[in-house]
Image (tube, helix red, strand yellow):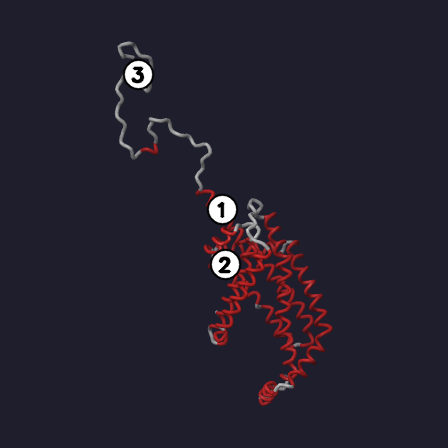
Amino acid sequence: MNDILRALGRALVSLLHPRMLWLTAMPFIVSGLLWGAVIWFGWEPFTDFLRVWLEQWEFTQWIYRFFGYFGVDSVRMALAPFILVALLVPLIVVTALLLIAGWSMPAVLRHLSRRHFIHLEARQGGSFWGSLGQSLGATVVFLIAALVTLPLWLVPPFFAIVPPLLWGWLTYRVMTYDALAFHASPEERRRLVREKRLPLLVIGVATGLLGSLPTLLWVSSVIMIVLFPVIALLAIWLYVVIFVFSALWFAHYCLRALSRMRAEEAHREPVFAGTVLPVAGMPTSESEDLPPAQALPESPESPLLPGPRSPNGSP
């Protein structure tokens, strides 16, 4: 837990660095310009198209009558914007993720390597295609698990447990690969994920809960249709900041754990340089399990007895 909190504090400090602030600004500017133009020029045409399309469905008419029975007639005006927001949110999130994965995450690792982990050897055990495959594979598993557990999302207390766990698992699987792709070898990455699975899942759940905060803005934007463009830009900025912060948190924790793992391996390895071999026949401290040596007879030919000798054997 101390390592998690230490990495959290360092991620918060790193997020305030001008380089990291720029990394949050670039995806926000690109996403904001792209989706801001779509919302500005396409909001009214899309909502009008959805209203006309919804009027043709008997199920929609039943929804209108059901809420009208309770005096809630505003559903007719709010349903089309709500559906449009539900369609736009995944597209906006995917855009921000692609920009951060392709631009921000490599820059985050370069920044941390120069400032905090300059001693760490880069073994480059990952690649862009490996990251893409890891992300797609984890996403497929996440979608299958989400469909299987979908009934539990409506049952308390599982609605507050299952979604954060699934989002946390997906986040740590994707972020861990990217955080270790440049520095760790494939064997080191697999070992670190295996040994640090629980702390990584904790970080993933925490960042997954942070990622749900912009959802509150999307819900409020449906209620306040007039402020939707402003709230949409604010939500995009929050997504970008949270994703960059998650990348920093995972990178600090994973690279520190990798540095410790290599230090432990180096400490366990035997050192052969400078080893002095004992002289044959001389007892050493490592041979304590051997029986004591017998006294050698005194003879002129014995090279182990010091001093000159006389012909009769006396010193």
Three-letter amino acid code of the residue under disc 3: Glu
Which residue position is annotated with label 1? Answer: 262
- Residue found at x 45% / y 35%: 272
**Spot occupied by residue 17 in the image (x, y as percentages of width and height):** 64, 54
Residue at image mark 3: 301
Q: Which residue is mark 2?
A: 200
Q: Nearer the viewer, residue 28 or 92?
A: 92
Answer with mark 2 or mark 1, whichever residue precedes in sequence.
Answer: 2
Distance from the alpha carbon under mark 2 to that under mark 3: 72 Å
Q: State which mark lies toward you, 2 or 3.
A: 3
Indicate the quadrant where residue 76 lies: bottom right
> Is residue 29 positioned above or below 114 on the image?
below
3D distance between C-alphas at marks 2 and 1: 19 Å
| N-term mark: 1 or 3 | 1
| Residue 14 rendering spot, x and y as whole percentages | 60, 54
As helix, strand or loop, the secondary structure at mark 1 comes to helix
Residue at left 56%, top 65%? Answer: 210
Q: Secondary structure at mark 2?
A: helix
Which one is earlier in the sequence, the residue at label 2 or at label 3? 2
Q: Image check: 287 left or right of 232?
A: left
- Amino acid, disc 2: Leu
Q: Quadrant of residue 248?
A: bottom right
Q: Amino acid at mark 1?
A: Arg
Mark drawn on residue 44: none
Residue density around tag 1, few if under 14, some if 14–19, many if 20 or more, within 10 Å: some
Q: How many residues crowd around disc 2 within 10 Å: few (fewer than 14), some, or many (20 or more)?
A: many
